[in-house]
Amino acid sequence: MLAMSAIEDNSIWSQAVCRSPHEAVPDGLTERWWVAHTRPRNEKALALDLQGRGILHYLPLCRRTTRSRNTGRLTRSIVPVFTGYLFFNGSEEQRCQALTTNRIANTLPVPDQRRLVGELRQIQKALAAEADLKWSGRVRVGDWARVVAGPLMGLEGVVHQRLSRLRLVLNVRMLSQSVSVEVSQEIVERIDTPSYAP
């Protein structure tokens, strides 16, 4: 398989980050959301394939900078937020079309469509604000909170504290994965449950 060109990479990046949460994960769709568990390193290529087939999809991406251990050189890349996963909306027929790309290991049905949409919109809101995301493990116990001011206003997640810094964890339970974003304690309020929960 050929590597992605820088032009394709930048095109996917601009489409992924420059959209509002409601543009990225729209309302009023008649089909259902699916989670595609991709073959290794096929997330962006699958996004392009689905785009070519007219299948609505959401691939959250972020910029990552790494330093080579050998040379010390910095490398900047655009990577999926959730390695190995892409979300798409379609009928059973479109799911079968997506499988013909040969880029999907399997698809996972989404039992709670509303919750997944809410969680994905939280991720997109953080990405659109170009927040510094850090990867977290599985969903952890903690207080739910909402950001009440600033560019992340309205963002909801689970509160975690690392050393002296407060982090808000944004969960995608379907994948048992999450990302976290640093927030100031002064602009966070406790809530009982997220607004997108049933």
Image: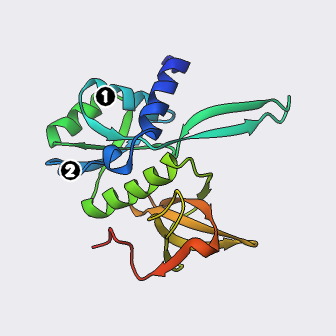
- Residue 18: horizontal and vertical position, in percent? 44, 38
Query: Which of the two residues, 75 or 125, is positioned nearer the viewer here?
Result: 125
Question: Quarter of the image holding residue 193?
Answer: bottom left
In the foreground, 113 or 26: 26
Amino acid tagged 1: Gln
Is residue 35 among the parts visible in the rendering?
no
Answer yes or no: do the residues labelled 1 and 2 have beta carbons within 8 Å? no
**What amino acid is labelled 2 in the image?**
Arg
* Colouring convention used in this rendered image of the protein: rainbow
* Secondary structure of the residue carrying numbered label 2: strand
> In this rendering, is residue 174 above or below 90?
below
Residue 162 in the image: state x and y as whole percent. 70, 70
Residue found 51% across the figure and 33% down from its top: 41
Indicate which disc, 1 or 2, sits on the residue closer to the N terminus: 2
Give the left or right position of residue 145, taking residue 161 as reference. left
**Measured from the top left, where is residue 180 in percent x and y?**
58, 60
Judge left or right: residue 141 versus residue 35. Answer: right
Indicate the secondary structure of the residue bearing disc 1: helix
* Image position of 116 with respect to 67: above or below: below
Q: Give neighbour class at mark 2: few <14, some 14-19, many 20+ (Cα, 10 Å).
A: some
Residue 51: give its label.
1
Quadrant into which the C terminus falls: bottom left
Residue at 16 percent across and 47 percent down: it is 31
**Which residue, given by chain and number where applicable, does mark 2 sit on?**
32
